Image (cartoon, grey):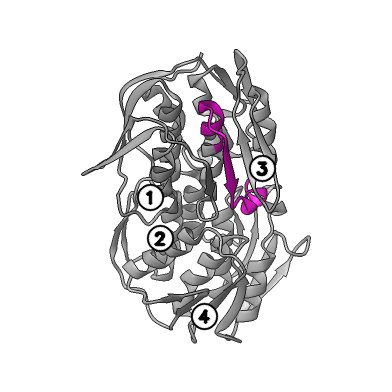
Amino acid sequence: MNNITLPVKNHFGEVTIPLPSSKSESNRVLIVDALTEGQNQISNLAEARDTQTMIRLLAEDPETLDVLDAGTTMRFLTAYAALTNRRKTLTGTPRMCERPIGILVDALRAIGAKIEYKGKEGYPPMETLGFEKQLTNKVQIRGDVSSQYISALLMNAPLLPEGLTLELTGKIGSKTYITMTLELMKQFGIAYSFEGNTISIAPQSYKNTSFAVESDWSGASYWFSLLACADEGSFFLKGLKENSLQGDSKIVEIMDKLGVQSEFKDDGILLTKKAITGLGSYDFTHCPDLAQTVAVTCALIGQKSQFTGLESLRIKETDRIYALQQELAKFNAKLEEGENGAFTVIPSTDIPANVTIETYDDHRMGMAFMPLVTKTSVTLLDKEVVNKSYPSFWKHCVLAGIEAQ
C-alpha cells in the first residue's frame, strides 16, 4: 500500500491553492449534457476519478457500466439508463455493491422502468431492461437517505412524457444538493416548483448552453481546516464563488467560528486567521461531507462540539461514524454517540509524537486527517485514496510546504 508520512508543519506563509473543479457539479452537468445529446459547451470538468469514470462510460456506452467506487455515478447512471430505455448492467467495486440502491430502483420501477437485481435484492449489480411507458407521474421517495437518489430522478424528469412530481417523505437530508441539481437544470432552461416537500417538473426540453464548473467547496474545506489548526498563515483558494450552488460552501460559516476569516475576491476566497468564537453545535443534515473535516478540526483545536444530521455517514464510502471514532482515538480524541442521533466531539488533550491514520478506502478520511500535521507527524495509509475526488491533493500540499518525509 502506498502510504505517505508528513512531518510537523504549523506555520504557513501566503499560499495559493488552485482548487480542483467540483465533482458534484461536474457529474450533474454530464448527465444533463447526455440528455441534450452533448450539444453544450461544458468547461472546467473535475479531475476526480468519479467524474472521469462518468465521462468515459457516457462516451464509450458499454453494455456493462462499471462505476468502480463512484456512488454518485452509480445513482445517476442507473436513472439515466433506466429512463432513457437503455439495456445496461450496472456494477462496481465490492464496497459499491454493499451500498443500498433499493429506494431509487423502487421509484424507477414505479415510474415504469424495468430493472432486475443480479445478486442481493436492493443492491448492485442490477440490469436495466427497458422503459416502454410511464406508469405514473407522482412518486413518493424518502428524503432522509440519499439526495443522490432524488437528483438522479429529477435530471431525467423533464424528458418523461408526463413529467414528474416527487413527494419527499420524512426529514429531508442534504437539501442543498437537491437545490444544486434544480438550479443547475434551471441554467439549462428547465422550470421547476419546489414547495414544502414536493418537487414538480413538467415535460419540457433542455436548452443548449455554456456552463463552467465551479471549484470544489468540499476540497476547499481541508484548507480551511489546515489554517484553523495552524499557528499562522493565509490561504487563497482559487475559483470559488460567493453565491455558490454547492452546499459545502457552508464551510465558510462553520470555520468563521473556528478561527478562519473568509474574504471573497474576484477569482476566489482569501482565508486568514482570526479569534475562535466556538462551535457549540452544528447540524450537518445538508452538508454531511463536511462532518469529518470539522470533527478533526474541533478535536485538534480544543473545541468540544455537538454534531447532528450524520445519519447518511454510515452508508458512504465507509461507515464514516465508525471510521472517525477509530481514528480520532489514535490521538486521544473522541466522537461520542448520544441520544437522538447526536454526537459529541471530545477534543484531544494529549497528541502523540507520531500518529498513523487508516483511510478505509475513503478519500475524505485521507484528506480530513491531513491537518494533523500542525500538531504531530502523521502517516496516512494509502495516499492514492484521494484520487476519487482530488487527485492533485498531495501536489497542493507541497505548494503549502507540506512534503512527505
* Alpha carbons under labels 1 and 2: distance apart: 9 Å
Q: Name the residue furthest right.
A: 120
| Residue 261 point in image, percent of width and height | 33, 36
Q: Earlier in the sequence, mark 1 or mark 3?
A: 1
Which element type, helix, strand or loop, lies under badge 1?
A: loop
* Marks 4 & 1, CB-CB < 8 Å contact: no
Q: Quadrant of residue 142?
A: bottom right
Q: Which residue is depicted at the point 59% across and 21% down?
A: 379
Nearest the eye: 155 or 261: 261
Q: CA distance from mark 1 to mark 3?
A: 30 Å
Q: Which residue is mark 2?
A: 29
- Kindly identify the residue that appears in the image at 47 percent across and 69 percent down: 155
Residue of label 4: 165
> Could one spot residue 181 in this view of the protein?
yes
Q: Residues within 10 Å of mark 3 (few under 14, many from 20)?
A: many
Q: Visible in this render: residue 112?
A: no
Q: Amino acid at mark 4?
A: Thr
Q: Circles 1 and 2: CB distance less than 8 Å?
A: yes
Task: Classify residue 356 as left or right of residue 229.
Answer: right
- The residue closer to the viewer here, 79 or 214, is 214
State yes or no: discs 4 and 3 in contact (Cβ < 8 Å). no
Amino acid type at image mark 2: Val
Magenta part of the protein: which range? 295-318
Q: Quadrant of the N terminus?
A: top right
